[in-house]
Amino acid sequence: MLANILDGIMNAISMGSLLANLMGVTLGIIFGALPGLTAAMGVALLIPLTFGMPAVEAFSALLGMYVGAIYGGCITAILVGTPGTVSAAATMLEGPALTARGESRRALDMATIASFVGGIVSALALIFIAPMLARAAMSFGAPEYFAVFGLTVVASLSSGHLVKGLISALAGLFLATIGLDPVTGDMRNTFDNPNLFNGLSLVPVLVGLFAVSQVLVTVEDVVRGVSLKESTVSKRGISLKDLTGNVVNFIRSSVIGTLIGIIPATGVSAASFLAYSEAKRFSKTPEMYGKGCVEGIAATESSNNAVCGGALIPLLTLGVPGDIITAIMLGALMIQGLTPGPLLFVEHPVTVYGIFAAFIIANIMMLVCGLIAVRGAGKIIAIPGAVLMPIVITLCVVGGYAVNNSTFDLLVVAIFGTVGYLMIKCDFPQPPLLLAMILEPIAEANFRRALTISQNDYSIFYTSPVACIILLVSLLVLLKPIYDDFRAGRKA
C-alpha cells in the first residue's frame, strides 16, 4: 500500500502533472471570474485536451480547473456584486460592501486563504473517508450497483424541476441506447447510420451541452451590450488578526462544506449559505454581518471550496456525482477507462492516490495563483465577451473533432449545443440528461446481470437489504419535491 501511495504522489508531482495542474488552476480562475464562462464549461472543454494523457496528469488539469473555477467566482462577487459562479452567490452578502468601503483587497485575500483552507480540509476527508467507504462497498453485487446508479439519476432530478428533470433523464436514456446492444450485439436506434453504430461519443456531447450552449447564452449578452466594468483593487490586504480570529470559523465552515459535498445533489450554494448563517450565529458581532464583514467571506469561501473534495468522495467510491461538475468528471473517468466504484481502489490504487495528491497540489496552486491574481483582478473581469467567445467556440470545435478526427462529431457538438441552449432557455436541467447517458450502460449491464443470476426473478432487488435501502432512498428523494410542492400549495 505504501508503494502505491508513493507511486501516486510521484505521478502527481511529475513535471507534466504539475504543468497540467498549473494550467488548470490558471484557466479555472479566469473561467470562474468571468460570468460568461462557467466551471462546468471549463471542465468540459478541458476533457478533449486531456484525451491521451496519463490518468493522473489528465486529472491534475481537470481538478485544477475545478478548484480554480469554484474559487474564481468570488472575484466578481466581491468587486462588482455579480457572482462568477453559483457557488459565490453567498459571498455577495459581504463582498460588495467591503469593496464600497475601499477594502476589496482585504476581502479578496480572505476569500483566497479561506478557499485554500476549505480545499485542504476536504482533501484530508477525501484521503481518509474514501478508502473506508470503498472497502464497505466491496460487498456490492449487481443489484446494489443497479440501485446506486438509479439513485444517482434520481438525485440529480431533485433540483426544483422534477418533471423536466425526468424528461431530460428519459432523453438521456434513449440516447445512451444508440449503438450495439451490450448483451445480444444487436443494433439499436442507429437509423442505419454507420456513424451511430458505436453510439454517441461522450466528448462531443459534453462539449456541445455545457460549452457551446453557454457560448450561445453569452453571445446574447454581447449583442445586448451587457458587460462588466473594470474595477480597482485597493492596496490594503488582510491582517494577521483577521486570520487568527477566523481559525474556528475556517474549520467549522470547511466541515460543513465537506459534509454537504458528500451528499449528492445538495448543491454548493446550500453549503455557502449554511456556513454563513452558522458563522453569524456564533459570531461575537452578528450585527456587522451584511455591512462588510470578512468573517462572512471566510465562511462562504471555505465552505464552497470544501464541497469540491466532499463531492469527489461519492464520485470515486460509488460513482455518484455530487454536482454538475463531478458529473462531467464521471465522464472523464469513463473516457480514461476507469470505472468509478470500490474496484477503482483495488484495480488502480496508484491512480487513485495520484488523484488525491493532485487535488492537494491544485489547492496549493490555487492559493499562490489566487494571491497573485487578486492584484490584477479588476482587469481580468473586464475582458469583453466579444473577445472571449470566438476563442471558446474555436476550442469547442477543436475539442469535438480531435478525439475521433470525425466531422460527424462536429455535427454532434452543434446539435447538442443547440439542445443545451434550448434547455437553458426552457429551464430543463442538463445534468439528468448527461448522467443518464453516462450511467445507462452500467445500470443496464448490472440490471440484466442481476436478472440472469436470479433467473428473471425481480425479487432480487428487494431481498438484498442494501439494494432495498438504496431504492427506498431513491423513492424518498423523488417524492420529496412533490411533498414540498404540496406543502407550499397548502400554505398558499
Image: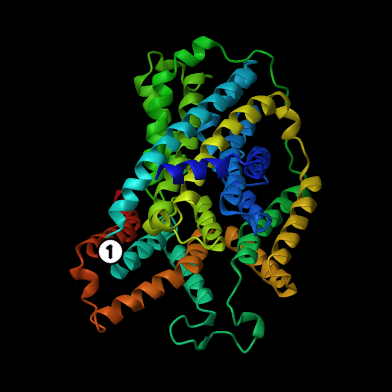
Residue at 35% x, 23% y is: 281
Of 431 and 467, the residue lying toward us: 467
Rendered residue at 36%/65% (across/down): 150
Residue 210's x, y, as percent? Answer: 61, 57
Q: Which residue is mark 1?
A: 471
Residue 199 in the image: above or below residue 306: below
Residue 85 is at least partly visible in this image: no
Q: Residue 112's image quarter? A: top right
> On the rendered image, what quadrant is the N terminus found in?
top left
Q: What amino acid does circle 1 point to?
A: Leu
Residue at x 44% of width, y 87% of height: 184
Q: Which of the colour schemes (rainbow, by chain, secondary structure, one colour) is used?
A: rainbow
Is residue 312 in sight in this rendering? yes
Left or right: 296 as drawn, with respect to 314: right
Q: Position of residue 152 (x, y in %)?
A: 40, 60
Question: Position of 168 compared to 103: left or right?
Answer: left
